[in-house]
Amino acid sequence: MLMFGCASQPSNLYNSIGGKQTVEKIADHFVDEIGNDKIIITYFAKSNVDRFHQSFITHLCSIIDGPCKYEGDNLREVHRGMNITEGDFNRIVDLLINAMRAAGLTHRERNRVLARVAPFRKEIIYH
Amino acid sequence: MVKYFIIRLLNNNLLITIILGLTVSNLPSIVYAADGKLISTTGVIQVEGTGGSGIVPWATLSGYDSREQISATAFLTRATVTDYELDIVGVSASFYDRVEVSFAQQKFNIDATNDEIKQDIIGIKARLYGDVVYSTWPQVSAGIQHKILKDSAIADALGANDSDNGTDFYLSLTKVHLGAVFGFNALWNTTFRYTNANQLGLLGFGGSDDDREIVLEASAAILVNRYLAFGIDYREKPNNLDTTEDDWKNLFVSYSPNKFVSLTAAWLRLGTIAGVDNQNGFYISLTGHF
């Protein structure tokens, strides 16, 4: 993982939702939401939660124009063998929405983040 | 639950089914409800009984089922315009987010003469490609609506080519764009329908000839939050009879407080129907998911 600073842009989604602090808050709440969901938690049975937490922060930061570069395994590799169903994926999205709400994002900010997350679905489900 | 619905459907006690269904749905321990999609992304049930908005079929299926789930949906609709009313009840089942089957009963009342026209519509729709929210390109579905007109006298009197039954074929493309309009989610739908149905089929099929043609239907909506959507529908009509048939337009608002129920209201501008012009009015529809 490599972090580097760069000049902030006014239309930058990362900055507009509150930057590093907000992304970390989303990750904290997301981990809580997953821990409290009896279906989704089963996917994390063999996972290192701290590692997931850190990777999630870096990945989210990188896809919403933040000053981070995600250098972990690509999402297809990360989810290989988990055979995540479409229904459970949508359930995880609901948990992420809850986490973003808990972190103080408005409805419109949540939609903008989801728009960045949505293209990764095909790398996550059914393999 | 689905089996139960089909048995009741065979007995043709639609209204009882719906009332029982709505009551039972309050008991989560008994009822299986598909919940594998994001709330408000299924649309509602349109006037011919398939998943869509008020008057236009969408590529979305009627339920919240994902690829591992089955769902059942029931709806009640009343449309009231200046000189007519249309009451519709129907049920549908959606399998594995792939195929939807539907059955709807329409009852059209003509205020001036107290005449009543009944029509049954059997529908099937298959999702051919994509996911309305997640795929890069729109979700695409193809469907068939077979319409059985129970009361033929008015269709015959107006000169319809066929006053017994007709079949519509359609192809729908639907896409949700997340956060696309000032951060709000936006939806659009385009439907191409191959049809000769006059006023949905209530006034028969075709005019002096069979008169089949492709008509265009479209919807656009904004989801102002997770539960509330505002939108517009436009439906081109075939206009086969000597009495003018105008294109239909509406403005709708749809409220889905949870994945069990949604309520839709619309303001209708339906133009000329059976020789009487300026048919404006309101539409209210209740959808229940099981």
Image (tube, rainbow, N blue to C red):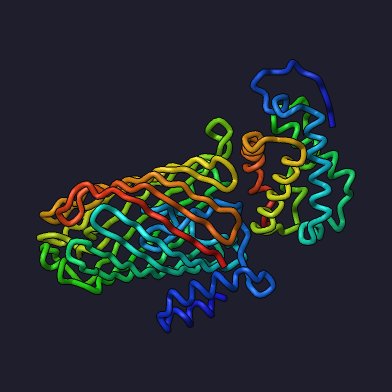
Residue B236 can be seen, yes or no = no
Report the residue at 21% width, 67% height from top.
B114
User: What percent of the width, then of the height, locates residue B175?
Assistant: 49, 45
Report the residue at 81% width, 60% height from top.
A42
User: What percent of the width, then of the height, locates residue B273?
Assistant: 20, 54
Q: Is residue A31 left or right of residue B97?
A: right
Report the residue at 22% width, 46% height from top.
B278
Front position in the image: B196 or A36:
A36
B20 w.r.t. B67: above or below? below
Residue B153 can be seen, yes or no = yes
Please tell me in which quadrant of the rendered image residue B26 appears: bottom right
B106 w.r.t. A107: above or below? below
Split into 4 quadrants, where in the image is the C terminus of chain B? Answer: bottom right
B81 w.r.t. B153: above or below? above
Front position in the image: B74 or A18:
B74
B269 w.r.t. B161: above or below? above
Q: Is residue A20 left or right of residue B188?
A: right
Front position in the image: A7 or B207:
B207
Q: Is residue A10 left or right of residue B134?
A: right
User: What percent of the width, then of the height, locates residue A112?
Assistant: 63, 35
Report the residue at 40% width, 61% height from top.
B77
